[in-house]
Image: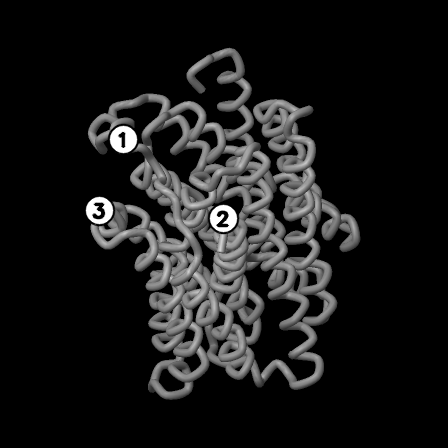
């Protein structure tokens, strides 16, 4: 095996991450009706998932350095596998179904957090020529995975019924199981040279690093505020059926996000990254306004799709900027930036859920509050354009 297999396994790792983050949101309305969960409890599922991933981001660097990347990658996929298996059984086995869901989420969130910390530096260390393009293409597989989760889940629901979702959880668990074995054999390359490695104290003392932390928070919040609520938004706010709502909501969002990442991967040499991120921030603000204020459901769905396209390069773009600006950051830098991104991933959906619950249960009104995140990101990148170290 050569480094191409390392990249293929990394692609599958991000598809696994997509399963971990986007399968359960398809069931939010089902959980609400079957288990009597309100919007705040539904939001807590998302907060726990990304919050625990955030904790893994914070605590994992010394563990990864000690046990190595290969074992860490295998364990990440094993946790994802166990979490998805548990989701199929625990809600019906425990007296409180909500507790069963939360335990399962905690298990697969451990895997998701590790995957997020490990995959980007693994691909960055591979001997590829265009690092920005490789990073953008890598992150596009999260989007293709997201779209695949939605489409394949919808097909399953259509033929077997939504009540058979535990069986689908078992089927999705096969992916991380396979990839755990795959990562046992692919070649891995040094993430940083030993003589260039920054200490954690030196990394945290850099103002540049904290700038990228802020960008990652806004990137995660801008993306997941729409992504996590897209299915429920299409069903409850727009009155669409489960099948049509998921196809036109989260699936379109994911396809548009993946397309923007793949396009930037292809044309990165012609379009400066910062200019692309500023334009994307403006487009993201427009998309949230359209989804929130449009009276026509078609226009609201267009806003959802535009949001997917606009947020595509926020996350990989911030990783690329940080890698080129801070040499020797290594595992700690990627982990802490992923932590910041996960903080945003929890903050964005919580903002929408909390706002909606206190505005008469209106998801459209709640989504309007998420506009603050792309606004802050766009302003920060705009004023950083002429700074050489950013």
**Mark toward the start of the polypeptide (3 vs 2):** 2
Hey, which residue is sitting farthest front in the picture? Answer: 1
The answer, for residue 360, to whether it is visible in the render is: no
Q: Residue at x 32, y 48 (%)?
A: 57
For label 2, the crowd category at 10 Å Cα-Cα, with few meaning under 14, some 14 to 19 and many 20 or more, is some
Q: Give whichever of 3, 390 is nearer the camera.
A: 3
Q: Residue at x 31, y 59 (%)?
A: 71
Mark 2–mark 1 Cα distance, whole angstroms, equals 23 Å
The residue indicated by pointer 2 is 3
Label at residue 62: 3
Mark 3–mark 1 Cα distance, whole angstroms, equals 14 Å
- Rendered-image quadrant of the C terminus: top left
Image-quadrant location for residue 338? top left
Question: Percent position (x, y) of residue 78?
Answer: 37, 68
Label at residue 197: 1
Identify the element where label 1 is drawn: loop
Front label number (3 vs 2)? 2
Q: Residue at x 63, y 56 (%)?
A: 144
Q: Give whichever of 357, 350 is nearer the camera.
A: 350
Q: In the shown orientation, is residue 142 left or right of residue 309?
A: left
Q: In the shown orientation, is residue 279 left or right of residue 190?
A: right
Label at residue 268: none
Q: In the shown orientation, is residue 9 left or right of residue 362?
A: left
The answer, for residue 72, to whether it is visible in the render is: yes
Question: Percent position (x, y) of residue 244?
Answer: 74, 67
Q: Residue at x 49, y 38 (%)?
A: 127
Compared with 380, 313 (above or below) is: below
**Mark toward the start of the polypeptide (2 vs 1):** 2
């Amino acid at each position: 095996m050569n480094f191409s297999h390392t990249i293929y396994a990394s692609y599958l790792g991000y598809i696994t991450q997509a399963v971990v983050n986007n399968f359960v949101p398809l069931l939010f309305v089902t959980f609400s009706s079957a288990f009597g969960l309100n919007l705040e409890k539904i939001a807590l599922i998302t907060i726990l998932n990304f919050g625990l991933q955030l904790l893994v981001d914070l605590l994992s660097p010394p563990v990864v350095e000690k046990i190595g990347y290969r074992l860490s990658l295998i364990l990440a996929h094993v946790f994802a596998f166990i979490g998805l298996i548990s989701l199929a059984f625990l809600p019906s086995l425990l007296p409180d179904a909500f507790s069963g869901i939360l335990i399962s989420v905690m298990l697969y969130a451990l895997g998701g957090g590790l995957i997020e910390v490990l995959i980007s530096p693994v691909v960055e260390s591979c001997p590829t020529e265009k690092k920005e393009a490789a990073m953008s293409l890598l992150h596009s597989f999260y989007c293709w995975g997201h779209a695949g989760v939605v489409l394949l889940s919808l097909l399953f629901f259509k033929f077997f019924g939504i009540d058979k979702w535990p069986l689908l959880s078992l089927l999705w668990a096969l992916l991380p199981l396979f990839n755990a074995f795959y990562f046992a054999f692919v070649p891995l390359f040094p993430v940083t040279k030993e003589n260039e490695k920054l200490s954690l104290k030196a990394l945290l003392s850099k103002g540049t690093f904290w700038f990228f932390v802020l960008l990652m928070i806004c990137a995660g919040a801008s993306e997941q505020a729409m992504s996590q609520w897209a299915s429920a938004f299409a069903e409850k706010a727009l009155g669409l059926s489960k099948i049509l709502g998921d196809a036109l909501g989260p699936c379109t969002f994911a396809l548009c996000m993946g397309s923007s990442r793949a396009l930037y991967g292809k044309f990165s040499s012609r379009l400066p990254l910062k200019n692309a991120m500023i334009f994307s921030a403006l487009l993201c603000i427009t998309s949230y306004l359209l989804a929130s204020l449009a009276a026509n459901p078609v226009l609201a769905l267009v806003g959802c799709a535009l949001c997917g396209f606009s947020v595509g390069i926020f996350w990989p773009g911030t990783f690329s900027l940080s890698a080129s600006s801070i040499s020797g950051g290594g595992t700690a830098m990627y982990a802490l930036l992923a932590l910041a991104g996960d903080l945003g991933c929890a903050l964005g959906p919580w903002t929408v859920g909390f706002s909606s619950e206190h505005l008469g249960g209106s998801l459209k009104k709640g989504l309007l509050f998420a506009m603050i995140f792309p606004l802050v990101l766009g302003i920060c990148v705009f004023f950083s354009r002429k700074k050489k170290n950013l």
